């Protein structure tokens, strides 16, 4: 079930750029589209917690983990508006490499040859996707935000996996963190948070409650059950919906190097996920 739900969440994440770009066209520029949707997810989670009379039950490290996941969500949403959708999606998905390093260095999980292959494949795939000749001049703000988002996600998912907590509480803190980081980014980049499109902001909150909240619930429930690298590699299924939709609907560049880079990233994911799933299956049957 965690594997299946992670795939569903990945498909939803891959199309997240659509409401973000729509809200941006309606006047919610910069980080404000993400702020609106995450605010809707926050409101929905708070209402749900109130109806269920569910208190916030997270220890300090779990809270740190969800704050980091919220930072990843916020920076990823901004990356989708400041670089090509295809670039943002694939650069974020260097996250499995960071997650595998964290698992090995801090959780004491074994480092197998598949881990090396997955790491090399992810990094090589990202370089190829950026044209094979990456310099600082080639890197856009959105590219850097996508990479930072992946690092924050890997660290946050590790803490969520190790510390756990109720999924609804994890979702509430994650969405609150995403709102906070989005507002901070808006202040740092524009010097203010003037809301020029209140109607679009309200629409964004509705989208957040109906779209982002279920997406976060699925993702964080799976994060409690699966090791961070395994979950992150499973979420690379987002590449299929995100990259393909970006190419088809936005006409973004996707030549031979980009194809090779995407294939390497997906192969790295498969090499890491399949042995883990086989081990889990063997444990369940024995």
Image (cartoon, grey):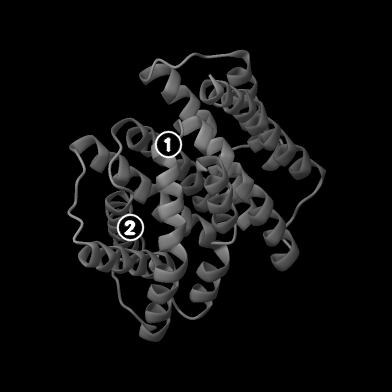
Residue at x 33% of width, y 43% of height: 68
Frontmost residue, 133 versus 82 = 82
Residue 111 x/y as whole percent: 52, 14
**Residue at the spot of label 2:** 175
Name above or below for residue 222 compared with residue 245. Answer: above
- Measure the C-alpha gap from mark 1 to mark 2: 20 Å
**Residue at the spot of label 1:** 225
Kindly give the residue lying farthest to the right in the view shown. 256
Residue 276 sits in quarter? top right
Task: Describe the element under mark 2 as helix, strand or loop.
Answer: helix
Residue at x 56% of width, y 43% of height: 235
Residue 205 x/y as whole percent: 38, 74
Q: Give the side of residue 241 with respect to residue 226, left or right.
A: right
Choose mark 1 or mark 2, whichever is in front: 1
Residue 27 x/y as whole percent: 45, 79
The residue carrying pointer 1 sits among few (fewer than 14), some (14 to 19) or many (20 or more) residues within 10 Å by Cα, namely some
Q: Give the side of residue 257 with respect to residue 245, left or right.
A: right
Q: Earlier in the sequence, mark 1 or mark 2?
A: 2
Residue at x 40% of width, y 47% of height: 220
Disc number for residue 178:
none
Kindly give the residue lying farthest to the bottom in the view shown. 199
Q: Do residues under tags 1 and 2 come within 8 Å of each other at their CB atoms?
A: no
Q: Give the side of residue 233 with respect to residue 98, left or right.
A: right
């Amino acid at each position: 079930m965690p594997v299946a739900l992670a795939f569903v969440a990945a498909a939803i994440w891959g199309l997240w750029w659509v409401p973000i770009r729509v809200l941006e066209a309606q006047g919610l520029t910069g980080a404000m589209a993400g702020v609106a949707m995450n605010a809707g997810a926050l409101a929905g989670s708070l209402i749900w917690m109130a109806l269920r009379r569910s208190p916030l039950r997270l220890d300090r490290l779990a809270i740190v983990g969800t704050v980091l996941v919220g930072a990843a969500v916020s920076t990823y949403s901004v990356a989708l508006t400041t670089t090509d959708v295809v670039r943002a999606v694939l650069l974020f998905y260097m996250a499995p490499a960071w997650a595998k390093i964290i698992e090995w260095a801090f959780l004491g999980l074994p480092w197998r040859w598949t881990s090396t292959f997955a790491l090399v494949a992810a990094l090589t795939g990202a370089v190829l996707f950026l044209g094979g000749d990456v310099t600082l001049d080639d890197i856009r703000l959105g590219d850097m935000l996508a990479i930072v988002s992946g690092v924050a996600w890997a660290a946050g998912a590790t803490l969520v996996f190790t510390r756990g907590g109720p999924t609804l509480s994890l979702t509430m803190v994650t969405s609150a963190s995403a709102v906070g980081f989005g507002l901070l980014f808006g202040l740092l980049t524009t010097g203010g948070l003037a809301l020029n499109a209140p109607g679009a902001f309200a629409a964004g909150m509705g989208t957040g409650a109906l779209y982002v909240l279920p997406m976060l619930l699925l993702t964080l429930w799976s994060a409690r059950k699966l090791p961070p690298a395994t979950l992150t590699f499973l979420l690379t299924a987002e590449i299929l919906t995100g990259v393909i939709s970006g190419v088809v609907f936005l006409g973004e560049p996707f030549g031979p190097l980009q194809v090779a880079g995407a294939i390497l990233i997906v192969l790295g994911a498969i090499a890491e996920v399949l042995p883990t799933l086989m081990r889990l299956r063997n444990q369940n049957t024995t």
